[in-house]
Structure formats: structure tokens, C-alpha cells
Image (spheres, rainbow, N blue to C red):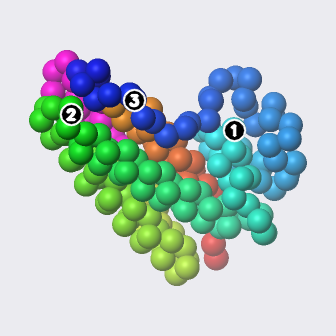
Amino acid sequence: MADALGPAIFLPSPPDSPAHSSSTLPLLSNNAALTKICDVTRYPAECLATIASFQTGETNPISVLKIGIHALQKSFEEATAVATKIINDLSTTAAVKAPLDTCVESFDSGIAVLSDALTAISGHDIGTLSTKLSAALTYSETCEEAFAEQPDLESPLKETNQHLDKLASINLAISASLQWS
């Protein structure tokens, strides 16, 4: 089925090899505060790579979390664009389009729920923040499950969904480390 989709299009995902751990990324971020924040995640190297490229101001868990949420929103938007492009490709079969429709709906939900997460940060509502970020973690899984329900159908978004999953996990871990009074 993959050749009916044309060339594979995936969002870039930072490598997660042992050679790319936070301790071996010497120039990625020389910010000790950012390294400490990212070290609470399962993917410290990806956290550093994502946040350091957007960071311009203060380094604290809340500012880092906001950057992470915006990065995840952008990744959901890019995933929606990729899925939509595949859906609109005339060579894409109906069997592939159906789960892709589920993916687009899930990704759009991810964008919306992350807006709610940003509002929760502004209101210092850790409960809502945690709920919204937990929900964001499920949207890439929903997309993959839509493909898994169809035997012999490989997801063209597998790498994209893995990237989304990592970013969502990073945000959830950072939010869990917040100390609000």
C-alpha cells in the first residue's frame, strides 16, 4: 500500500540514540537551567533540541513549557497538513483515506486542547493543565490505532506520530515538575 501513497512525508524527528543524550549535546544548549528542566523528561535531548531553538528569554519551567506546547501545536498543524496532502493525493486509496480522516480529526483536537493547556497555565490551573496535556498524548495514538484496525495497512504517519508522542511526553513531564503555590 505504501507505494500507492507516493513518497513518504514525515516531520523531522530528532534522533534518540545514546550519542544524542543531553550530556553529549555540548553546544545545543549551554543553559544549565534548561538542561535541568529537560532532564526531568524521558527525552532530554529532544527537549533541548526543541526548546533551545525557540528560546529567547527567561528560562524557567513555565516558559519552557509554553515553548514546548507551542512546538507541539505547530507539529500537530504540520501533521494535519501532511495527512491532508496524502488524503488529497489521487493515488491514495479509500482504505488509507479513512484512517487518515481520523488522524486529521485527532490532530485538530490536539491543537485545540493545547490552546486550553496554555489558558490553564495562565490561570495556574495545574489540574486542567495536566488533563489537557494527557489528552494531547493520546491523539497520535488514536491516529496509529486507526491504521492498526485495518490488517496489512501501514501508517504513513508512523514517524510523525512518534515525534508528536515524544513532544507530548516532554510537555507532560515538565508540567508534572511545576511547583505552583
Toward the viewer: 16 or 87? 87
Query: In the shown orientation, is residue 58 left or right of residue 137?
Result: right
Q: Report the amino acid beneath label 3.
A: Ala
Q: Secondary structure at mark 1?
A: helix
Q: Considering the image in quadrants, where does the N terminus appear?
A: top left
- Mark 3 Cα shell of 10 Å, populated few (<14), some (14-19), many (≥20): few
Toward the viewer: 11 or 140? 11
Q: Report the amino acid beneath label 2.
A: Thr
Query: In the shown orientation, is residue 64 left or right of residue 86?
Result: right
Task: For the residues labelled 3 and 2, say whether their Cβ atoms are less than 8 Å apart.
Answer: no
Q: Secondary structure at mark 2?
A: loop
What is the total number of numbered labels drawn onto the structure image? 3
Which residue lies under the disc numbered 1?
Answer: 45
Which residue lies most toward the left here?
A: 94
Q: Nearer the viewer, mark 1 or mark 2?
A: 2
- Per the model, the C-alpha gap separating discs 1 and 3 is 25 Å
Query: In terms of image quadrants, where is residue 99?
Result: top left
- The stretch of residues the image draws in magenta is 140-155
Taking the magenta stretch, the answer to whether it contains residue 167 is no
Q: Is 44 above or below relative to 18?
A: below
| x, y percent for residue 12 | 55, 38
Taking the magenta stretch, the answer to whether it contains residue 151 is yes
Which residue lies under the disc numbered 3?
Answer: 8
Instruction: Mark yes or no: residue 90 visible.
Output: yes
| x, y percent for residue 161 | 41, 39
Q: Secondary structure at mark 3?
A: loop
- Per the model, the C-alpha gap separating discs 3 and 2 is 12 Å
Q: Which of marks 2 and 1 precedes in the sequence?
A: 1
Q: Report the amino acid beneath label 1.
A: Ala
Which residue lies most toward the top here?
A: 152
Q: Residue 92 bears which disc, if any? A: 2
